[in-house]
Image (tube, rainbow, N blue to C red):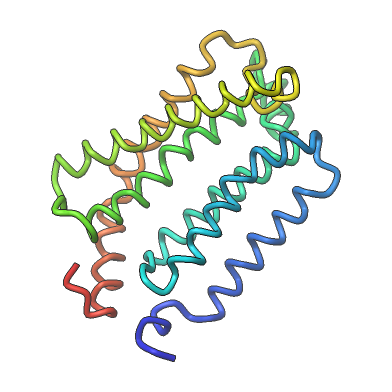
Amino acid sequence: MDEESATIPSKLIFLWLFLFFFVLIWSAIHPHDLFTWFLEVLPALLGLAVLAITFRSFRFTRMVYWLMLIHSIILMIGGHYTYAEVPLFNWLRDVFHMSRNNYDKVGHFAQGFIPAIITREILIRKSPVKNGKWLFFIVVCICLALSVIYEFIEWWVSVVTGTAAESFLGTQGYVWDTQSDMFMALVGAIAALSLLSKLHDRELSLHLTSHNDPR
């Protein structure tokens, strides 16, 4: 095993893959709507493919890999039940007399929170922007742009497929759903950078030192 491989033990890689495929297979068993399941889990599958292709040339910190797994699981749960029918959030809706199931807001918060740390790591390691206010600002802007693009995709899928995409849209009759989704992604990105930047810097320092990588 070379120095690069030694930084991520094979047991952790197998655990990551086991959890990913375990939840993926579970989510594919009798999903609420098969078309919605496919649309929701597709980003996780595409992400896994990108990670596999780039694994030898660019390895993220362990922290980022675990965050990616959490995000994938959030997508798979939403794909299995649809974002409007996740049981725990139906229960919360009924207990707290909410007007809707808000699991989709968790998903969009994660859509900002987790990509923020991924983007931060890529910029620190591969761009002239290493730290400070400009890094914070650029990461937030990129995450908000990704959220906007995802809303575009939801719109295009709805136009092309018609009523088949209703569960994928998951508006639940809320007229400001698109705007609130993007706002939650914005809040998630700011929260991630505010809460995890110091921890991420420590992870990066250990990671880059183990690779003898000057960035």
Above or below 36: residue 24:
below
Whole-percent x and y of residue 30?
86, 44
Whole-percent x and y of residue 209?
23, 77
Decide which of 146, 177 is in the foreground and name it: 146
Whole-percent x and y of residue 102?
61, 25
Decide which of 83, 162 is in the foreground and name it: 162
Q: Can you name the residue that lies furthest to the top here?
A: 175
> Residue sitting at 44 percent across and 30 percent down?
149
Decide which of 94, 135 is in the foreground and name it: 135
- Which quadrant of the view contains residue 74? top right
Q: Can you name the residue that lies furthest to the right here?
A: 30
> Residue sitting at 28 percent across and 79 percent down?
211
Above or below 188: residue 90:
above
Q: Can you name the residue that lies furthest to the front here?
A: 160
> Residue sitting at 61 percent across and 43 percent down?
75
- Which quadrant of the view contains residue 79? top right
Decide which of 61, 125 is in the foreground and name it: 125
Tally of numbered discs: 0
> Residue sitting at 68 percent across and 43 percent down?
77
Q: Quadrant of the C terminus?
A: bottom left
Above or below 141: residue 53:
below
- Which quadrant of the view contains residue 202? bottom left
Whole-percent x and y of residue 212?
22, 80
Describe residue 191's horizontal placement relative to residue 71 as left or right: left
Q: Quadrant of the N terminus?
A: bottom left
